Image: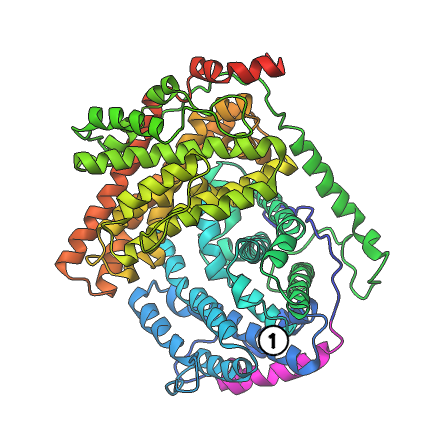
Amino acid sequence: MQPFTLPDFYVPHPARINPHLEGARVHTRQWARDMGMVDDTRDPGTPEIWDEAELEAMDYALLCAYTHPDCDGPMLDLVTDWYVWVFYFDDHFLEVYKKTGDLEGAKAYLGRLGAFMPLGPSGTPPEPVNAVERGLIDLWERTVPARTPGWAERFRRYTVDLLDSSIWELHNINDGRVPNPIEYVSMRRKVGGAPWSAGLVEHAANAEVPDRVAESRPLRVLRDTFSDGVHLRNDIFSYQRETEREGEVNNCVLVVERFLNTDTQQAADTVNELITSRLRQFENTVFTELPPLLEEHALTPPERAAVAAYVKGLQDWQSGGHEWHMRSSRYMNGGGDRSAITLGGPTGLGTAAAHLPTVLRAARRNVVASNMNVPFRRVGPTRLPDFTMPYPVRVNPHRERARQACIRWCDEMGMFGPVARMPEPVWDERGLAGYAFEICSASIDPDATAEELDLSAQWLAWGTYGDDYFPAIFFRDRDMAGAKVFNARLPLFMPLDCGPTPPPLNPVEAGLADLWRRTAGPMPDKGRALFRTAVEKMTTSWLWELNNHIQQRVPDPVDYIEMRRRTFGSDLTMSLTRIGHLGEIPDAVYDSDTMLAIENAAMDYACLTNDVFSYQKEIEFEGETHNGVLAVERFLSCGRTEAVAIVNDLMTARLREFEHLSATALPLLCDDLDLDDRARAALDDHVEELRDWMAGILKWHRETARYLEEELIRANTPRLSLSSRR
């Protein structure tokens, strides 16, 4: 019996099949034998992973014929061999390392595989000793010579991520630990290999994405939404096999089932809704973010054609992958809705009607969810949950001095005065005094000197003023062109050589120029570059908010969480602590998945804290669509009370993940990198600083007047009178 009925999937594009399917079946059957993957060809001592009958039934050639319907025969053979290799690796790793819990053996095994993907002609791989190594070097040598160095580097990185992230899965299995939803989606992209699949789409379609836009937000979102759609669909189909036969804990249906404390059917339906949301994010990015990117980077006609072919290839993969999951013996697929399947059916102009049932159902769900968000609706104060916060708060003794200095500085920068395009100032002195940024800075920087605390409080004031100024100027008029000009000027006030800057045109530019000179001046060159990048992450994220505001669009929940870290300015405040440890903590630590996960968990705790406290301010007084509580309301079709409880549970889960990684994964990373005592002590200090950061931000939210209803009414009275809204 299946544990649940397959949901109604959103499949907006027709699946098509490659005419070279039979040739690929014959070719890959022989290739698997040549590599030693089946029956009597296995290496001595290798357990039986597949026999030929199992390989035939799983039919990876059919998968590739569906997902790459337009490539020629030799290319289909090559792509099919890649997928046979990756599925063999997955099953082999399960049998040899996951089931036995052999962590050390897994690390040694994975540690060799990077050598079989050399970059450049000088790399000489070792002699392969098993089917995975043999297959990898054969495929690498058949693929990479036809591609540019930029593609080869990206594809190698995706492959290494796919392989190495198996350790994360193994840790969770050994600990019996089901990850939280944010952690799971992030890591599933790597271990599931869909970024790797996206790289093969570029290769099979001969449509390399130009290096200068490959890591831009639109291309990154297309890759990530593609990955999430592929992986979460796979989790639904593979739930029964993974939970009943393999003892797997890394499955999104199981993650949602545990996190929301719901039954398996509801969890599967919720995961399917997330797939739909991610695919609609893909579509939104194609139509609203990709065209401006092509113009701004002046892509040539051939480059634009390559990007278009890449997008089409990702769409083909989604539809073809769904079709294969409905038919492969590897997965649970009984009782599924096949109304959207068009195997061998018509394609081209006018054939989209074959998919109207699923498209209309998805559209109806989207309309219902959109109607839940009424701008400026009366919501009243939010009843705060019982937040989990185990860390004590320490307060800097220079707090009062920082308060006075912050008020003077904001006045000097013109933040209380009139600004162009605004009928009244963005801030006044009374409001700033109630915001009490010195409480936040004194709590997140309890050991800072008086001068350092002044700077910290003023950076917080500057970032918050910018966050208020930007929508006040550009949201009202939906002025994307003006916003981009404004944003493009900001780096001019952060010269890496700390040289002269242009005359400022507004308080945001004036404040940035002053703070940059005082903060970056004493920094080493590397520190300046890191800090400027952190500031730019925040300021460019305001454009993303404006894009959604113009559409009156509540963001997809995954996109929201990942961009919220930027809009909150998390990197800006965290980077000051990182820069303080330059020379003590190696770059490899900060670049590791472990440290990235630790810092992201801390960021999410702080960002979601802000969303709970700021709900009334943003929904009732600002007509905002960017709020984590609202995103949960919209996605789960629930009320605010339930959404706040879920957000609080998510905050607690992220806090527990922070502590789990700090206690278990971080020491292992130190051992792997052979860090000395000085580096380990500095790393311990950094983790403690992150604890101070989370505790201090919660304390500030509890004590600031920024989110109190009486302050919101006072600050918004001129606008409310003009609009006669109350």
Could you say whether the residue bearing mark 1 is in a helix, strand or loop? helix
> Magenta span: helix, strand or loop, mainly?
helix
On the image, the x and y values in percent for residue 428 come to: 41, 20
Identified by mark 1, the residue type is Val
| Closer to the camera in the image, 416 or 621 | 416
- Residue 604 lies, in percent from the top left, at 40, 40
The image position of residue 408, as x and y in percent, is 29, 26
Answer left or right for 724 relative to 385: right
Q: Is residue 699 visible?
A: no
Residue sitting at 38 percent across and 55 percent down? 173
**Which residue is pictured at 68% across the width and 50% down the height?**
287
Residue extending farthest to the right is 350
Picture residue at 67% right of the left edge, 80% below the top? 24
| Residue 270 visible in image | yes
Where 69 sits versus 129, above or below? above
Residue 669 against residue 7 in the figure, above or below: below
* Up/down of 226 relative to 394, above or below: below
**In the visual, does 222 lie left or right of 496?**
right
Query: In which quadrant of the rendered image does the C terminus lie?
Result: top right
Q: What residue is drawn where x is 74% and y is 56%? A: 13
Neighbourhood count class around disc 1 (C-alpha, 10 Å): few under 14, some 14–19, many 20 upward: many
Would you name the residue on which mark 1 appears?
79
- Residue 219 figure quarter: bottom right
Q: Nearer the viewer, residue 689 or 716?
A: 716
Q: Magenta residues?
A: 18-41
Q: Quadrant of residue 436?
A: top left
Q: How many marks?
A: 1
Find out whether residue 441 is within the magenta segment. Answer: no
